[in-house]
Image (spheres, coloured by chain):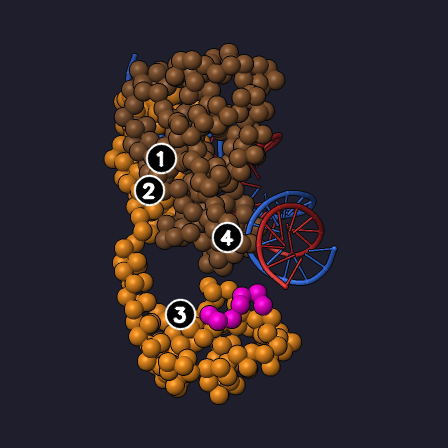
Chain colours: A brown, B orange, C blue, D red
Amino acid sequence: MQLDRIVAFHKAMGDPTRIRIVALLANGPLHGQAIAGKLGLTPPTITHHIKKLRDINVIFERRDKNTLYFHLNESLIKQQAKTLGKLIEKKEEEVENMVELNIERQKVIDNFFTKEGKLKNIPAQRKKKLMVFEYMVRGLKSGKKYPEKELNEYITKFHEDYATIRREFIINHYMYRENGIYELNPEEMWAKPE
Amino acid sequence: MQLDRIVAFHKAMGDPTRIRIVALLANGPLHGQAIAGKLGLTPPTITHHIKKLRDINVIFERRDKNTLYFHLNESLIKQQAKTLGKLIEKKEEEVENMVELNIERQKVIDNFFTKEGKLKNIPAQRKKKLMVFEYMVRGLKSGKKYPEKELNEYITKFHEDYATIRREFIINHYMYRENGIYELNPEEMWAKPE
DNA sequence: CCACTAATTTAACATTCATCTAATTAGATA
DNA sequence: TATCTAATTAGATGAATGTTAAATTAGTGG
């Protein structure tokens, strides 16, 4: 778990309004105006905070008619709680491994993508392949529903063979498909090289 | 819930320098200048951050001659990690109460309405009265503007005394009136029995 | 296409905050 | 007491942040 992510999480949680939102959503999804009402704040303020919470994947949303219902990503929070515990157990070697992993990851990205952001080819090695896919998939929004056509267009920005890559996204649990609509899985479900 | 404490903790952890300090101290106590050196910052900056970490009890210090060694309070961090997990646990009592409440509500509705859907009479007990009103008001569309005449007609489907009931709708914040036009309030504003 | 609703963006404001340099304090020791 | 070292405070500065009213956008349904 990299530093930025930990910091971003705690910074997001370090605000009374946002903690109250999270606590509210623990009892079930709510829409924006309901949250505003319960907290005595205005809708723009809620939007502001929701954005921050969504940025760190702690909430996602589903639409019903005109109304967006905001849901809590509970597993993400649990995962961060674990990370907090691990932070204080960590010994130097582990920190070093983490740093090395990030360096390696960056090298792989640099190798397989052109400066214009195109994927040169799909890595054969599973580990590298996953790094590449994870990099691509991070440009998708969690909670958003992607029709197949839109997903294809997104992938095409990286590589022409959208069919193969789209299939890989499913196989490796980055996304799931329902009635021809694609959506991101929570990050904990993504395939990881051990 | 000790909201302030939770917020203070995450706010303190929501800074890269402080996370790095915590990570450093996980490998053992250090004194101020050592921390400053390792992080490439000046001693006053370290003092600044140490103060914040000490405020939330995540750090304590021991003196050896002129030098203060800062120690990590690991159990405090573990405890906060647990708190994070509990934040998102659904309160089961609340869920159970909800279920029981619904059963009770159904009984009241069955008692006070005929099979044809007519309100036999207005309950005297506040709690039951509110259940009955809420039941009626759920047949109205949120966001729709009701002229008084139309609202009267709607209420009459349940009971002849539309004037009393219409007044109760306002008193209990199910609806509000503006220029003789009635409209539903958001559900959060409705009167609820405590 | 039009009317409506929910959500978001924009612009403005006051507040908080991380960091530095320079000056000061606190404690140890000779 | 005088001196050394480590830590803290004070003050300044620039950046980030929480909130709101007003305007705008996006999506739904007639």
Give the label on residue B187, or none: none
Give the label on residue B192, or none: 3
Q: Chain of mark 4?
A: A
Are dots 2 and 4 on a single chain? no
Amino acid tagged 1: Gln
Determine whether label 2 and label 1 are within 8 Å by CB: yes
The residue tagged 2 is B84
Q: Is residue B86 left or right of residue B117?
A: left
Secondary structure beneath dot 3 equals: loop
Q: Chain of mark 1?
A: A
Amino acid tagged 3: Lys
The span picked out in magenta is B138-144
- Magenta run includes residue B29: no
Amino acid tagged 4: Asp
Q: Residue furthest left?
A: B75
Amino acid tagged 2: Leu
